Amino acid sequence: MQQSKEQRVHGVFEKIYKNYDQMNSVISFQRHKAWRKDTMKRMNVQKGTKALDVCCGTADWTLAMAEAVGETGEAVGLDFSQNMLKIGEEKVKNSSFSNITLLHGNAMELPFEDNSFDYVTIGFGLRNVPDYLQVLKEMQRVVKPGGKVVCLETSQPTMIGYRQMYLLYFKYIMPALGKMVAKSYDEYSWLQESARDFPGQKQLADMFRKAGLTDVEVKSYTGGVAAMHLGYKR
């Protein structure tokens, strides 16, 4: 029986969790950290606010949000992979933060009331959900009026030549690195498929608007291999 996207993705992350952080650094040549740092700067997170990190994985962005909102704020991370959350829980335990909650849950049906958070983020997770627009609608639902919904994700380079190099890298080199570093060729082959099929920057900006978000900002990184999308709830 053919697996659904949700089942396949769940199986991938339940398997690769031990090497996930290391592989992120290898695959992006450490650039993902700089992309997230710039995104946080653009978000201008205020102290004492409440943030939700959807598809939080091993909780790196959740931890960054916890620092940004400060002791009087709150950071919540949600993911559907228990194994990924175990790594995140260890990081939280070894950190100095007491304002973090990690939850097991589904991005398609966020277990929160409407208008609960000042910021809702998703980092390199949107491409793995069954329905991009549904997740964006859920993120829009739980953010407060005036709040921000932010996605940092792989994107589609448009420069001739550069795009071809990008596709070759994701199709052949990334799965090979997955096999060498994480002993997970099939899983990293799936991740290159999800990156290859993900909407371009203009398409994703349109999805933000369809989800009810306004004043959508887009920032391209490293020739378009990744991009930040930020929208407001009015």
Image (tube, grey):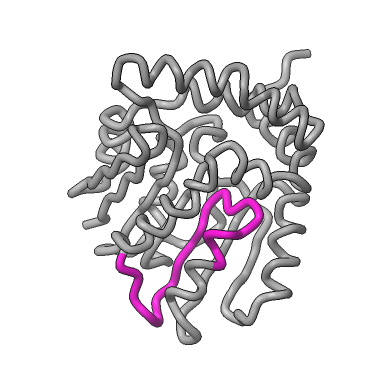
Question: Could you say where residue 123 lies in the image, as x and y percent from the top left?
Answer: 49, 48
- Vertical placement of 151 versus 3: above or below? below
Residue 58 covered by magenta stretch: yes
| Left or right: 40 as drawn, with respect to 24 | left
- Where residue 203 sits, quadrant-wise, is top left
Question: Could you say where residue 38 lies in the image, as x and y percent from the top left?
Answer: 36, 57
| Left or right: 50 as drawn, with respect to 79 | left
Query: Which residue is located at x 74 percent, y 45 percent?
Result: 19
- Vertical placement of 53 versus 216: above or below? below
- Where residue 134 sits, quadrant-wise, is top left
Residue closest to the far left: 215
Question: Could you say where residue 154 lies in the image, as x and y percent from the top left?
Answer: 45, 35
Pick the quarter of the image with the N terminus.
Answer: top right
- Magenta stretch bounds: 44-63
Residue closest to the far bottom: 72
| Left or right: 214 as drawn, with respect to 154 | left
Q: Nearer the viewer, residue 185 or 210?
A: 185
Pick the quarter of the image with the C terminus.
Answer: bottom left
Question: Could you say where residue 62 lies in the image, as x and y percent from the top left?
Answer: 54, 63
Residue 223 covered by magenta stretch: no
Query: Which residue is located at x 26 percent, y 55 percent?
Result: 233
